[in-house]
């Protein structure tokens, strides 16, 4: 066996190992870069999916600008709300209600994009029940757009005195 060729092969292996370490570092950097690209693609895909789901819900963008539940001295109440359509889709109907108070439902129809409309409902003293001034109640607003899409929001309102 020739020792000269064995020593030569060992040097080549060391050189390959040294180059292998450099390649391993480059491979690590490449792996990190690929992970970063995958995360970026996932973020873009997630954003697209979120935008698509908003469109699927009708793209309705409505805001309750004012909401009041006023109790008078006789115990009866007046429920008043103002809704603004901030979207580009016509809202056929907006149903604003406080489920815990019978009769506290307002329906506002035909709200054009950019338009603000108000509505009110009278509530008997019996239906106002124990909801005294300062009581905080939770309600729901459901909007139906001209494209058939719907959107739902929740709100809170504090009973005030007249």
Image (spheres, rainbow, N blue to C red):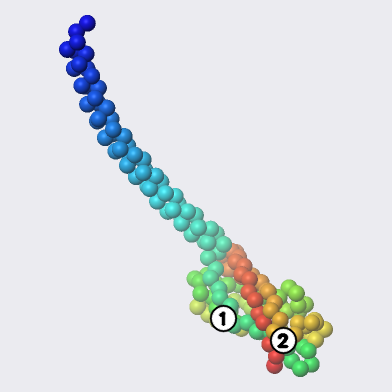
Mark positioned earlier in the residue sequence (1 or 2): 1
Q: Residue furthest top?
A: 1
Other-residue count near label 2 (Cα within 10 Å), few / some / many at <14 / 14–19 / ≥20: some
Is disc 1 placed on a helix, strand or loop?
strand
Q: Return the x and y of residue 108 as percentages of the image width and height.
A: 64, 78
Local crowd size for mark 1, using a 10 Å CA cut-off: few (<14), some (14–19), many (≥20): few
Quadrant where the C terminus sits is: bottom right
Q: In this view, does 11 lie above or below 29?
A: above
Query: Would residue 59 be visible to someone looking at this image?
Result: yes
Label 1: which residue? 65
Residue 129: give its label. none
How far across and down, in percent of the image, does residue 55 sit? 52, 61
CB within 8 Å, label 1 to label 2: no
Q: Left of 101 or right of it: where is 117?
A: left
Marks 1/2: CA–CA distance: 21 Å
Image quarter in which the N terminus is found: top left
Q: Name the residue: 58% across, 68% down.
A: 145
Closer-to-camera residue (129/114):
129
Residue topped by disc 2 = 133
């Amino acid at each position: 066996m020739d020792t000269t060729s064995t020593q030569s092969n060992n040097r080549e292996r060391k050189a390959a190992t040294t180059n292998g370490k450099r390649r391993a570092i480059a491979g690590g950097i490449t792996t990190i870069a690929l992970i970063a690209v995958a995360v970026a693609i996932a973020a873009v895909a997630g954003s697209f999916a979120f935008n698509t789901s908003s469109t699927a819900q009708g793209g309705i963008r409505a805001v309750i600008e004012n909401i009041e539940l006023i109790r008078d001295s006789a115990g009866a109440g007046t429920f008043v709300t103002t809704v603004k359509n901030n979207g580009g889709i016509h809202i056929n109907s907006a149903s604003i209600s406080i489920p815990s108070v019978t009769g506290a439902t307002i329906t506002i129809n035909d709200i054009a994009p950019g338009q603000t409309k108000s509505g009110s409902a009278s509530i008997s003293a019996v239906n106002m029940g124990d909801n005294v001034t300062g009581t905080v109640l939770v309600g729901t607003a459901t909007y139906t757009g001209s494209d058939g899409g719907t959107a739902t929001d929740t709100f809170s309102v504090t009973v005030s005195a007249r």
